[in-house]
Image (cartoon, grey):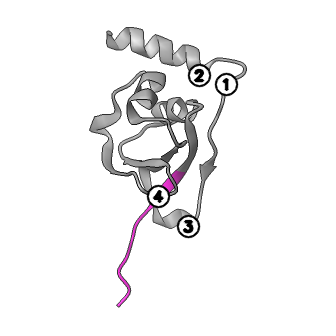
């Protein structure tokens, strides 16, 4: 699939009037947010490949880690996610929620 075709299909998804939008959740201080980095929670039974197919993108270049054992969800951390890609990810009905990613510090 060409990049242009993929981009036009993604725009069609984003412009749909009945578009689903997964919640964007925040649990920390805005100063600690890592720009462009998010934790994506897929509903149980929704695979990464199914997610890629809906988003019309291979997100592997953005994924820095996955978790498969938390509450039966597949969770992945993605970085370098721009606003357009984030909107496409959130439009997948298989995405339960998207969390901002935060800097972690060791407490001594």
Task: State the residue at coordinates (38%, 25%).
Answer: 57
Q: Position of residue 27 (x, y in %)?
A: 58, 64
- Marks 2 and 3, the one that precedes in the sequence: 2
Provide the residue designation for mark 1: 19
Residue at image position (72%, 19%) is: 17
Q: Provide the residue designation for mark 3.
A: 28
Q: Which residue is mark 4?
A: 70
For the C terminus, the image quarter is bottom left
Point out residue 70 in the picture as x, y percentages from the top left corner. Answer: 47, 58
Magenta region, main secondary structure: loop
Query: As displayed, is residue 54 above or below residue 2?
Result: below
- Which residue is labeled 2 in the image? 14
Badge 1 or badge 4: first in the primary sequence: 1
Residue at x 40% of width, y 8% of height = 5
Q: Which of the two labelled residues, at mark 1 and mark 3, occupies the earlier sequence position? A: 1
Disc 2 packing (10 Å; few <14; some 14–19; many ≥20): many
Label 3, secondary structure: give it: loop
**Could you tell me how far apart the alpha carbons at marks 2 and 1 are, in whole angstroms?**
7 Å
Q: Earlier in the sequence, mark 4 or mark 2?
A: 2
The Cα–Cα distance between marks 1 and 3, rounded to whole angstroms, is: 28 Å
- Whether tag 4 and tag 2 are in contact, CB under 8 A, the answer is no
């Amino acid at each position: 699939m060409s990049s242009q075709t993929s981009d036009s299909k993604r725009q069609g998804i984003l412009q749909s009037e009945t578009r689903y939008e997964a919640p964007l959740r925040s649990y920390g201080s805005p100063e600690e947010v890592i720009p462009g980095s998010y934790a994506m929670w897929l509903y149980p039974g929704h695979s990464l490949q199914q997610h890629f197919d809906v988003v019309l993108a291979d997100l592997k270049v953005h994924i820095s880690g996955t978790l498969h054992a938390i509450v039966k969800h597949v969770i992945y951390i993605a970085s370098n996610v721009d606003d357009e890609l984030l909107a496409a990810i959130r439009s997948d009905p298989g995405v339960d929620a998207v969390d901002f990613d935060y800097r972690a510090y060791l407490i001594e």
